[in-house]
Amino acid sequence: MNWYLEVLKKYAVFQGRARRKEYWMFTLFNIIIAMAIGFVSGLADAVFETGVVLSLATNAVYSLAILIPATAVSIRRMHDLGGSGWWILVPVVNLVFMFLDSQSGDNEYGPNPKAA
């Protein structure tokens, strides 16, 4: 959970580097939280018969709240590989890059976070 909170503390920090573990732990907790929100709001919709409005609203609010930190950690992850943050706009390349190991040593985006 610390990895998730660490990304939220860097809410709109697009500079620097993010380790592979930081990115994937944030993504994992993001999926777990989204599923929990979906389950609870779906259960509430069934009990209170409100239709899907509550479910859609809560998922939309969470998605919008997490959009900036998710983008920021993705860009920092690209920086960790030595690439530009613009690579996140190419989905297939982006997914492949997220699995690669960090660029060893310092690069133009800062020191290697694994060394710290």
Image (tube, helix red, strand yellow):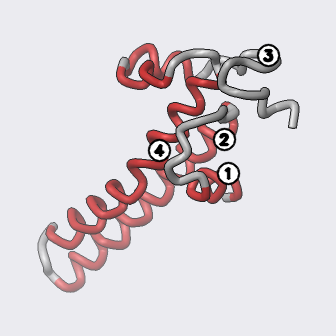
Residue displayed at 73% across by 16% down: 103
Q: Which mark is residue 22?
A: 2
CB under 8 Å between discs 4 and 2: no
- Sequence-first disc among 4 and 2: 2
Q: Helix or strand or loop: what does disc 2 sit on?
A: helix
Residue displayed at 82% across by 31% down: 114
Q: From the viewer's perspective, is residue 83 above or below residue 4?
A: above
CB under 8 Å between discs 2 and 1: yes
CB under 8 Å between discs 1 and 4: no
Query: Amino acid type of disc 3?
Result: Ser
Residue displayed at 24% across by 83% down: 47
59 left or right of 54 in image: right
Please state the horizontal and vertical placement of residue 116, each as a whole percent of the image.
Answer: 87, 37
Q: Quadrant of residue 37?
A: bottom left
- Sequence-first disc among 2 and 1: 1
3 left or right of 86 in image: right
Q: Which mark is residue 104?
A: 3
Distance from disc 4 to disc 3, alpha carbons, whole Å, reads 24 Å
Which residue sits furthest bottom? 48
Query: Amino acid type of disc 2?
Result: Glu
Query: Amino acid type of disc 4?
Result: Ala
Distance from disc 1 to disc 3, alpha carbons, whole Å, reads 21 Å
Query: Amino acid type of disc 1?
Result: Trp
Please state the horizontal and vertical placement of residue 53, each as a whole percent of the image.
Answer: 15, 69
Q: Which mark is residue 70?
A: 4
Q: Nearer the viewer, residue 2 or 46?
A: 2
Q: Helix or strand or loop: what does disc 3 sit on?
A: loop
Residue with the mark numbered 1? 3
How many residues crowd mark 3 within 10 Å: few (<14), some (14–19), many (20+)?
Answer: some
14 left or right of 41 in image: right
- Sequence-first disc among 1 and 3: 1
